Image (cartoon, helix red, strand yellow):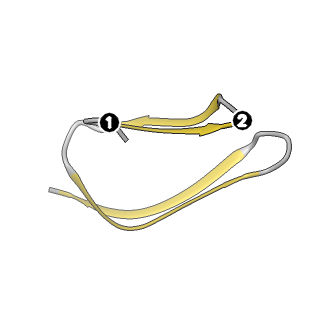
Amino acid sequence: WHESTISVFWNESLVFDYVHNHPLLFYFFSLAVDRGGLATWAVDCLPL
C-alpha cells in the first residue's frame, strides 16, 4: 500500500493493483489467488 495505490504481488508478479481517488476506511478486505494466478477480492469500505 503506497499513498493512493494498493498493490499485491505473488511470486514477484503483480496480481492486484487498485488506485483510489479519495481516502478509504476499510472494514474488511480479503484477497485470494489461485494457482493459475486468478485473483478474487472482496472489500467493505467507506469513502471518507
Q: Position of residue 6 (x, y in %)?
A: 41, 40
28 vs 26, left or right, is right
Residue 17 position, x and y percent, is 49, 34
| Residue drawn at x 68%, y 46% as measured from the top left | 39
Residue name at image x 25 percent, y 36 percent: 3
- Residue found at x 30% / y 38%: 20
Residue 48 as seen in the image, left or right of residue 29: left
Q: Which one is nearer the viewer's eye here, 36 or 45? A: 36
Q: Which mark is residue 11?
A: 2
Classify mark 1: helix, strand or loop.
Answer: loop
> Which quarter of the figure has residue 18?
top left
Q: Is residue 16 above or below residue 30?
A: above
In the rendered image, residue 27, in percent from the top left (x then y), is placed at 34, 71
Amino acid marked by disc 1? His
Q: Which circle marks residue 2 in the picture?
A: 1
- Judge by depth and name the residue closer to the eye, 17 or 46: 17
